Image (cartoon, grey):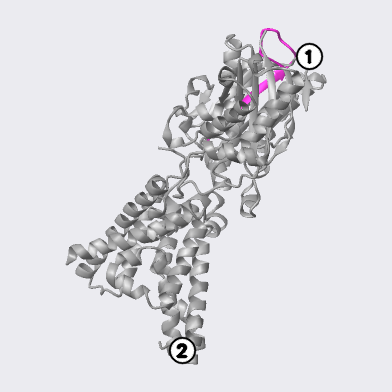
């Protein structure tokens, strides 16, 4: 059911964003605090083993929100810890480099070469 | 007039945060961003032989690229004013934070400006992502060693 | 603390320059110059801002038929760290210079000092004023220009503009400065850097009240009391404060705010304009011209400033604010 697949991507992705919006509006957190909280939450949910089922259900609805960054790093660390024990906890995180970060660095650099910030309201 | 009286006047006049409207907009636009991402996962699985477990990386990179472009053109900021967390929480928001800071630093040169400022806002996300991954894995390792849980 | 200027120094000439975005301002037609490029064809925003300040001063000198060396004092400030745009502009001007910082209230604090120097006969010609640059200010106080942070309805838009006035001996046919009030620093505990109007309104209230009391005046003695950049919401709060102390509706109508009106009703600018250049560019163009034309006989200009820094905000400090007022009359 391809429709249902997209529906869950939309639903779960939207819900995670709503949690972020509530943290900012009701919790009065800055965007920086909000995103940090979400990343840590993703990490903890991952440790409990609940993030993968979320990805299975929602696909990009769970991998696109920043929570998945916490999940990816945690899964990396846990997988290596399973193989190599204590040392793996440290080295595991470096195995799973997030493509989001490296892509942002590369495109950020390229954008800085091309663009100039412009202060226009509309 | 003391501080408390003033607080009353200020609260009366300051327009309240439109919670419902903001949440609705964040849900719709955030959901839409993820749906677009989901379309890319199909694209990469069908045309580039990615599997469901490996498709996360090219998808995120593509979304990051689109957000970088929109940031440079000054469009992302305008969408974000409407979307709030709907564009801040997806990985596109991470891209926007990195790219906007990078562009901004250009006048101070590529090392002192772009390089040093790039993670001005996104840095905390990386710190807490890595640190929490470390502690969660450590706790899991301890629990497994103690025999409380299994891998 | 009210200061009376017995010699009534006059505003001999004004110069105002604004950036491209300020074409959308309702005060646009009153500005002397509007530049197409927001960096004034310089490499950086900060250099552009220095250029903008220089240009405003040159306009004044042309109007008054003066040269650099005729200017005894240059009193000015801006919002950038260590006020480099102003300092760099002063390097080109080559007058005696005091950099002044009262955040967005600098447009008036500089005028008070210039009037004092004129009153003392220490200065024949002094240029006073302030400027702000949207890009240079936002990146320092808030987020990078292209960062997608959702701003609340109380947020204001920092203008790119400079406004300067030439102060000299009394001339009965020109707007003249009769009194001024140096404000205290008032802090009612506001912590939200996106609600400057709410933070600054108490300071404006305090200074205006002190001025009226010190001068033994009523609100209705004025044709206009114009605050600097409280914005739409801050102006409403200020009016509510005066209403609570017994001011009637016709008295409340005397109050206007440069920031609230600057961009008209355009919602893209949320609660309106802000920045040291906002009040300066409006006071030293529109207000001066309206006084010269005889529309206003007695005006109280009260510029407000939020004395925060990005560090003080991150360290969880509240936002202390100040307001300085100057009373201008036209005979």
Span highlighted in magenta in the image: C158-177
Density class for disc 2 (Cα within 10 Å; few <14, some 14-19, many ≥20) is: few
Residue at the image position 68 percent from the left and 43 percent from the top: C82
The answer for how far apart the CA atoms under marks 1 and 2 are is 87 Å
Q: Is residue A103 in view?
A: yes
* Residue bearing the label numbered 2: B148
Q: Which mark is residue B118?
A: none
C169 in magenta: yes
C155 in magenta: no
- In this rendering, position of residue C202 left or right of residue C231: right
Q: Between residue B140 and residue B2, name the one nearer to us.
A: B2
Which image quarter is the N terminus of chain C in? top right
Label 1–label 2 contact, CB within 8 A: no
* Residue bearing the label numbered 1: C7
Q: Position of residue C27 (x, y in %)?
A: 50, 23
State which quadrant residue B35 falls in.
Answer: bottom left
């Amino acid at each position: 059911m391809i429709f249902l697949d997209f529906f869950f991507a939309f639903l779960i992705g939207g819900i995670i964003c709503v949690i972020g919006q509530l943290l900012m509006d009701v919790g009065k957190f800055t965007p920086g605090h909000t995103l940090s909280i979400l990343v840590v939450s993703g990490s903890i949910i991952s440790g409990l083993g609940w993030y993968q089922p979320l990805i299975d259900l929602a696909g990009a609805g769970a991998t696109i929100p920043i929570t998945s960054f916490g999940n990816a790093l945690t899964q990396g660390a846990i997988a290596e810890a399973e193989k190599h024990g204590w040392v793996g906890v440290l080295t595991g995180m470096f195995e799973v480099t997030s493509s989001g970060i490296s892509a942002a660095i590369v495109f950020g650099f390229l954008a800085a070469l091309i663009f100039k910030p412009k202060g226009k309201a509309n | 007039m003391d501080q408390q009286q003033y607080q009353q006047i200020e609260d009366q006049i300051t327009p309240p945060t439109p919670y419902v409207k903001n949440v609705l907009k964040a849900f719709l636009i955030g959901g839409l961003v993820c749906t677009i991402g989901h379309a890319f996962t199909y694209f990469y699985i069908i045309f580039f032989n990615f599997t469901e477990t490996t498709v996360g990386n090219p998808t995120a990179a593509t979304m990051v690229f689109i957000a970088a472009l929109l940031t440079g053109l000054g469009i992302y900021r305008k969408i974000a004013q409407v979307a709030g967390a709907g564009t801040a929480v997806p990985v596109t928001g991470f891209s926007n934070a990195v790219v906007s800071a990078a562009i901004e630093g250009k006048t101070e040169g590529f090392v002192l400006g772009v390089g040093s400022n790039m993670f001005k806002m996104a840095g905390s996300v990386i710190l807490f992502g890595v640190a929490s991954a470390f502690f969660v894995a450590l706790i899991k390792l301890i629990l497994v060693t103690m025999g409380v849980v299994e891998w | 603390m009210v200061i009376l200027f017995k010699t009534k120094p006059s505003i001999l000439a004004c110069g105002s320059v604004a950036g491209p975005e300020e074409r959308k301002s309702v005060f646009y037609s009153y500005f002397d110059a509007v530049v197409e490029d927001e960096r004034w064809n310089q490499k950086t925003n900060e250099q552009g801002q220095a250029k903008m300040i220089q240009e405003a001063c040159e306009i004044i000198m042309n109007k008054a038929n003066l040269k650099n060396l005729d200017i005894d004092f240059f009193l000015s400030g801006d919002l950038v760290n260590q006020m480099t745009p102003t300092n760099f502009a002063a390097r080109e001007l080559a007058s005696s210079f005091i950099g002044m910082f009262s955040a967005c209230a600098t447009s008036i604090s500089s005028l008070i000092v210039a009037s004092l120097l004129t009153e003392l006969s220490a200065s024949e010609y002094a240029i006073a004023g302030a400027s702000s640059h949207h890009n240079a200010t936002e990146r320092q106080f808030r987020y990078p220009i292209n960062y997608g942070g959702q701003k609340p309805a109380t947020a204001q838009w920092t203008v790119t503009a400079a406004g300067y006035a030439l102060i000299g001996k009394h001339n009965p046919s020109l707007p003249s400065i009769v009194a001024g009030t140096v404000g205290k620093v008032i802090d009612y505990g506001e912590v939200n850097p996106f609600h400057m109007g709410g933070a600054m309104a108490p300071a404006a209230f305090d200074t205006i009240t002190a001025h009226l009391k010190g001068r033994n005046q009523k609100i209705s003695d004025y044709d206009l009391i114009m605050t600097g950049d409280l914005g739409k919401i801050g102006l409403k709060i200020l009016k509510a404060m005066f209403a609570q102390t017994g001011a009637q509706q016709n008295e409340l109508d005397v109050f206007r705010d440069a920031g609230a009106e600057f961009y008209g009703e355009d919602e893209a600018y949320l609660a309106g304009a802000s920045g040291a250049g906002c009040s300066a560019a409006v006071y030293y163009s529109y207000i001066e011209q309206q006084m010269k034309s005889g529309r206003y006989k007695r005006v109280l200009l009260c510029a407000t400033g939020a004395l925060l820094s990005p560090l003080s905000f991150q360290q969880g400090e509240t936002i202390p604010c100040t307001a300085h007022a100057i009373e201008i009359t036209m005979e």
